[in-house]
Image (cartoon, helix red, strand yellow):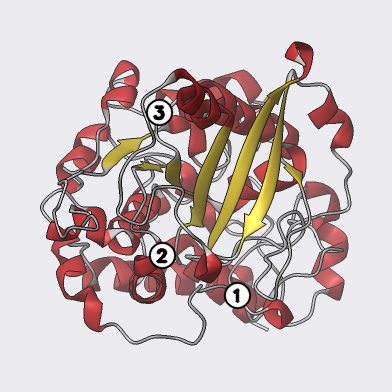
């Protein structure tokens, strides 16, 4: 077994190598149409490789026991707990959000097949606000995921993500701030593009976390929706194009867990806006150059030694709820993509959405399994005001 400090050096070496050999280039998406298909239309982690519903994300209370019992790790994701019942939390909120899973390869866009919009009348607007088709995607493998995997393989135990000691938690190192995609992550996004692009033509709005790995993933996966890509034009039944462009919008409401882990801290905004000129960052301008959302949470949760606390699933679920109800529901678009992160999506599926059982062989488990890297799950969301019934 390698000593923790030795594993830390390995992690740093891996990070330096990945960082130096790869610079993200949005123009990469131009050549993605030749990317190889990988089986099913939806790129997702095989069920046999996903964490079981009895496992939980590593935290301070369980790390000491897990250190002596964990088996060799073959994936690069922390584990999640699905045993907690959050129905009481869902019932306490004024708006219920029902979710129905739709297998992506069986999905029919709510827009007509010719890409036209619904009639502009009151009934259509009301229905649009109460029902949305949302393609939720998790980012592909980031540098922090690769560090997690290699550290865990070398030490024989997972990183204690709640530790404030960088020798046992390399995700506290400043070089991992706003972790980018690895080459593997780029390939995962390319494969998802190749598998899903035909099913995502009707997307009208792409909302993405302001963290770089999510922006990179979305730019590749939804490459056909880039402003200067002719695929943005939709043919009607007469062969005419309406030229409707897809909106791209960064939103703090769908970013990853706040708190201790520096991989989830945003880099200066000016660096991000230059790298992703097709994305509208206007909603972040109020926060300025630095990551105010991160620093505010850190200040409010700091312990006696000044260490910020990790955002809990319950706390995160409040952010998810606010994003879905007060932002997404109010948008006029009826088919939307949201590209975010594993913990955020886990909080959404377990502590916000009232997930119904779907049908068909392609049904994706909404409430239990964590999202695989670059995985897309398509859902029909229905918003119901409990006090207006």
- The percent coordinates of residue 108 (x first, y second) are 48, 59
User: Does residue 343 appear anywhere in the picture?
Assistant: yes
Q: Quadrant of the C terminus?
A: top right
Given the current orientation, which residue lies at the most extreme front position?
Answer: 238
User: Does residue 165 appear anywhere in the picture?
Assistant: no
Spatial CA distance of label 3 from label 2 is 21 Å
Residue 28 in the figure: left or right of residue 371: left
Q: State the residue position of label 3.
A: 332
Q: Quadrant of the N terminus?
A: bottom right
Which is closer to the viewer, label 3 or label 1?
Answer: 3
Given the current orientation, which residue lies at the most extreme top position?
Answer: 387
Q: Which residue is nearer to you in this view: 214 or 201?
A: 201
Label whose residue precedes the other's in the sequence (1 or 2): 1
Q: State the residue position of label 2.
A: 199
Q: Which mark is residue 45?
A: 1
Tell me if residue 376 comes above or below residue 271 in the rendering.
below
- The percent coordinates of residue 272 (x first, y second) are 24, 42
Q: Which residue is nearer to you in this view: 3 or 240?
A: 240
């Amino acid at each position: 077994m390698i000593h923790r400090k030795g594993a830390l050096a390995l992690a740093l070496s891996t990070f330096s190598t990945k960082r130096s050999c790869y610079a993200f280039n949005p123009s990469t998406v131009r050549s993605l149409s030749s990317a190889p298909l990988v089986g099913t239309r939806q790129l997702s982690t095989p069920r046999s490789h996903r964490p079981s519903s009895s496992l939980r994300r590593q935290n301070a209370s369980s790390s000491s026991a897990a250190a002596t019992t964990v088996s060799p790790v073959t994936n690069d994701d922390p584990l999640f707990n699905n045993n907690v019942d959050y129905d009481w939390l869902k019932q306490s909120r004024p708006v219920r959000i029902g979710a129905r899973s739709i297998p992506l390869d069986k999905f029919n866009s709510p827009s007509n097949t010719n890409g036209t919009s619904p009639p502009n009348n009151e009934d259509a607007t009301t229905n649009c606000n109460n029902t949305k088709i949302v393609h939720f995607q998790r980012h592909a493998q980031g540098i922090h995921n690769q560090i997690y995997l290699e550290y865990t393989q070398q030490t024989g135990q997972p990183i204690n993500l709640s530790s404030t000691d960088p020798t046992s938690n390399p995700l506290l190192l400043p070089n991992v701030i706003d972790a980018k995609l690895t080459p593997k992550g780029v390939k995962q996004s390319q494969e998802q593009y190749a598998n899903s692009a035909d099913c995502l033509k009707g997307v009208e709005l792409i909302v993405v976390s302001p963290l770089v790995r999510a922006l990179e993933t979305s730019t590749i996966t939804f490459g056909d929706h880039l402003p200067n890509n002719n695929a943005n034009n939709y043919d009607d039944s007469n062969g005419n194009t309406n030229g409707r462009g897809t909106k791209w919008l960064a939103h703090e409401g769908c970013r990853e867990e706040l708190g201790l882990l520096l991989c989830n801290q945003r880099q200066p905004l000016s660096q991000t806006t230059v790298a992703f000129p097709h994305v509208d960052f206007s909603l972040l301008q109020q926060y300025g150059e630095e990551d105010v959302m991160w620093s505010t949470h850190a200040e409010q949760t700091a312990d006696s030694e000044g260490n910020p606390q990790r955002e809990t699933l319950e706390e995160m679920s409040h952010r998810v709820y606010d994003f879905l109800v007060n932002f997404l529901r109010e948008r006029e678009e009826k088919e939307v993509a949201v590209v975010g992160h594993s913990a955020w999506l886990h909080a959404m599926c377990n502590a916000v959405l009232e997930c119904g059982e779907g049908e068909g062989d392609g049904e994706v488990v909404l409430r239990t399994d964590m999202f695989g890297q670059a995985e897309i799950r398509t859902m029909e969301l229905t918003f119901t005001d409990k006090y207006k019934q």
